[in-house]
Image (spheres, rainbow, N blue to C red):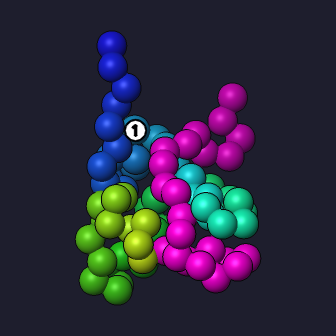
Amino acid sequence: MGRKTHRTLGDLVQDSRWLYVQCRECHHSAKLDPREVQMICYRNNYAPVIDRLAGQMRCSKCGLKRVYLGPCYPPGFI
């Protein structure tokens, strides 16, 4: 079996995954609930496509828009 591709935030929600965000510059990272990110996307008229979001997101530590996005398990996942 191959790995599942998560192209949209909806794919993450459906697969019970969260969005992992890591700054490529300072390496600050966070796990975000994709449902909350979806709401922000809809309010700001952004497409909820993960590849496109990488150019929209900014590191909360250093302020740069150089982030890696990928799926991760939610906090507390055993």
Q: Which residue is labeled 1 in the image? A: 15
Residue 75, percent across and down? 68, 46
Write down the quadrant of residue 24 in the picture. Answer: bottom right
What's the amino acid at mark 1?
Asp
Question: Bounds of the magenta span?
Answer: 57-78
Question: Principal SS element in the magenta part?
Answer: loop
User: Is 40 placed above or below 76 here?
Assistant: below
Q: Going 66% across and 66% down the picture, which residue do you hit?
A: 25
Say whether residue 1 is left or right of residue 56: left
Q: Position of residue 4 (x, y in %)?
A: 34, 31
Residue 56 visible, this angle: yes
Query: Against 67, is 42 above or below?
Result: below
**Relative to 41, does residue 28 appear above or below in the rendering?**
above
Q: Position of residue 71 (x, y in %)?
A: 49, 45
Q: Is residue 23 magenta?
A: no
Q: Quadrant of residue 6?
A: top left
Q: Is residue 45 left or right of residue 67?
A: left
Is residue 14 visible in the rendered image? The answer is no
Residue 50 occupies quadrant: bottom left
Residue under the point 73% across and 76% down = 61
Front one among 70 and 27: 27
Observer-nearest of 50 and 42? 50
Tell me residue 69's x, y (percent): 49, 55
